[in-house]
Image (spheres, rainbow, N blue to C red):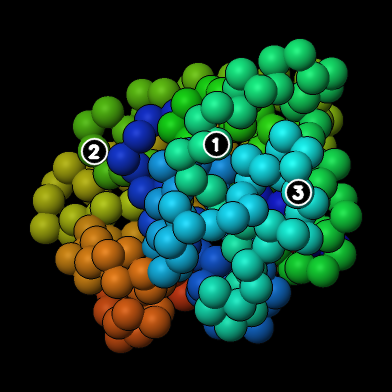
């Protein structure tokens, strides 16, 4: 049975999609069967695996409004051992489409129940907002992984996210918990990055992953080639970081 992890932070530009793509690929390289669900209408996790999001016929949108089954939306082996549920801009309309649908927070969960036993991990790249999409992802998830950028306002929005997780746990998904915080865009040359890491560790009761994702030109380049970092440049510091994060996630699979 898959461990289902929503990768979420209401703050944009913190490395959610980069982490979704590269963690999925790194877990797969460790022999895990992975499904990545793009729950963001921007569709960047979709294009990050080289899939033309505008040409995708069946996406998360069609699945959520009942026009396609989860099996019909799957794109298998975007890289070895990684399947993708793609998204594009159509997904932005889902809020309006589902407004009168009863128990619309559970649509994603119901679909995933059909395929959970086919994967070791299911990752969901959430949009940077508290929409019905994020709520669906959290209702379907076992855990929430929170990427935090190493910058001055790192903790801003985190308390709101924790509040949201607690609300979803109380009302929709009693098993939901925070998997942990992973630091992204870490620059070892600056005191600020080190201070942010220390500050968050001091003020946060949640698990903080040992692995820190560095600020990296190669990581930034990889999506434009439609490749995860372990394919684009396997020897880069970014690839090494996501390999280490994948190992930490696997070690915590039963936590």
Which residue position is annotated with label 2?
151
Instruction: Depth check: give the residue in front, 42 or 2.
Output: 42
Residue 188: where, in percent of width, then height?
Answer: 18, 59
Which quadrant would the C terminus be assigned to in this image?
A: bottom right
Q: CA distance from mark 3 to mark 1?
A: 14 Å
Q: Which residue lies at the image location 77% right of the left edge and 24% below the top edge? A: 104
Q: Which residue lies at the image location 78% right of the left edge and 60% below the top edge? A: 71
Q: Nearer the viewer, mark 3 or mark 1?
A: 3
**Local secondary structure at mark 2:** loop
Instruction: Depth check: give the residue in front, 50 or 66.
Output: 66
Labelled disc at residue 91: 1
**Local secondary structure at mark 3:** loop
Q: Which residue lies at the image location 22% right of the left edge and 32% below the top edge? A: 152
Residue 184 lies, with reference to residue 79, above or below; the image says above
Residue 64 lies, with reference to residue 166, above or below; the image says below
Which residue position is annotated with label 3?
68
Disc 2 packing (10 Å; few <14; some 14–19; many ≥20): some
In the picture provided, is 155 more to the left or to the right than 221?
right
**Which badge, 3 or 1, comes first in the chain's sequence?**
3
**Local secondary structure at mark 1:** helix
- Quarter of the image for residue 80 reads bottom right
């Amino acid at each position: 049975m898959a461990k289902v992890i929503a990768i979420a932070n209401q703050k944009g530009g913190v490395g959610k999609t980069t982490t979704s793509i590269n963690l999925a690929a790194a877990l797969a390289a460790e022999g895990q069967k992975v499904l990545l669900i793009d729950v963001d209408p921007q569709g960047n996790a979709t294009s990050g695996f080289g899939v033309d999001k505008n040409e995708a016929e069946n996406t998360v949108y069609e699945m959520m409004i009942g026009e396609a089954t989860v099996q019909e939306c799957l794109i298998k082996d975007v890289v070895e051992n990684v399947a993708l549920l793609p998204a594009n801009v159509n997904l932005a309309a889902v809020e309006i489409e589902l407004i009168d649908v009863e128990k619309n927070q559970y649509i994603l969960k119901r679909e995933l129940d059909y395929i959970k036993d086919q994967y070791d991990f299911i990752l969901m790249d959430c949009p940077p907002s508290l929409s019905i999409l994020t709520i669906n992802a959290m209702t379907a998830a076992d855990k929430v992984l929170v990427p935090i950028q190493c910058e001055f306002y790192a903790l801003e929005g985190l308390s709101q996210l924790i509040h949201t997780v607690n609300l979803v746990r109380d009302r929709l998904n009693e098993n939901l918990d925070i998997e942990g915080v992973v630091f992204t865009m870490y620059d070892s040359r600056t005191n600020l990055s080190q201070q942010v890491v220390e500050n968050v560790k001091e003020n946060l009761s949640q698990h903080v992953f040992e692995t820190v994702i560095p600020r990296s030109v190669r990581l930034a380049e990889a999506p434009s080639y439609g490749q995860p970092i372990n394919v684009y440049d396997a020897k880069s510091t970014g690839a090494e970081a996501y390999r280490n994060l994948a190992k930490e996630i696997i070690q915590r699979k039963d936590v």
